[in-house]
Image: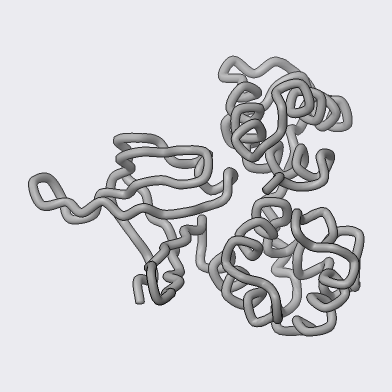
Amino acid sequence: MIASLSGTVADVRLDRAVIDVGGAGGAVGYLVHATPATLSALRVGEPARLATSMVVREDSFTLFGFADDDERTVFEAVQTVSGVGPRLALAMLAVHTPDALRRAVAGEDIAALMRVPGIGRKGAQRIALELGDRLGAPTGTDPDTAPGAPGSVVDDQRDQVVQALVGLGWNPKAAEDALATVLTQAGADAVAPDEIAGALRASLRVLGGPRG
């Protein structure tokens, strides 16, 4: 089992990244699937560490990467629910942070769970019932923040948020409108680099979750 990867970011796409592990001349590139929020923090050529979970099938070995151990724990826990596989589990973390999922399950917030693509009302009810208290209580360290105080930001990351949404299946106009709604609600006119993850999740909630 590969529990984590530490190395140099070789490539970043909208749904995956390649991490070179092992140093110059002997590096091995690991393909890791992750949420847009996790991928937004990676920069090609820079060092990175991802908590990982390996899913083994008869014909494949697939690595999923996470910003921290808590995301990985939630990813693995939700797959104990019948009908929830790794792709759906990753989609849940693309739309909600670990603490947001804990609150949704604990409060039986069916509407929040249904924002994830592929989860209907019956599926959401099953998730809330079967997970119960397996996720534990919210940690209170939820990083899910949309753009903050108004004011211009020199390094505006709106384009990166829109591109990520387009990569998830939304057309550019819908992506731009969703982000505009998020910015308006936050009273902001830009997305700072450290606000990308929050802006992505907030935009996905406006749109109803990533497509596919």
Spot occupied by residue 152 in the image (x, y as percentages of width and height)? 70, 15
Quarter of the image with the N terminus in it: bottom left
The residue sitting at 84% across, 39% down in the picture is 206
Residue 17 vertical placement versus 199 (above, below):
below
Residue 88 vertical placement versus 212 (above, below):
below
Q: Is residue 148 left or right of residue 4?
A: right
Residue 89 picture quarter: bottom right
Residue 201 vertical placement versus 118 (above, below):
above
Spot occupied by residue 34 in the image (x, y as percentages of width and height)? 51, 52
Spot occupied by residue 144 in the image (x, y as percentages of width and height)? 71, 49
The residue sitting at 61% across, 70% down in the picture is 85
Front-lying residue, 207 or 66: 207
Colouring method of the image: one colour
Seen as rendered, the residue at the extreme front is 59
Q: Is residue 157 left or right of residue 17?
A: right
Total count of labels:
0
The residue sitting at 42% across, 38% down in the picture is 12
Front-lying residue, 150 or 114: 114
The residue sitting at 85% across, 63% down in the picture is 120
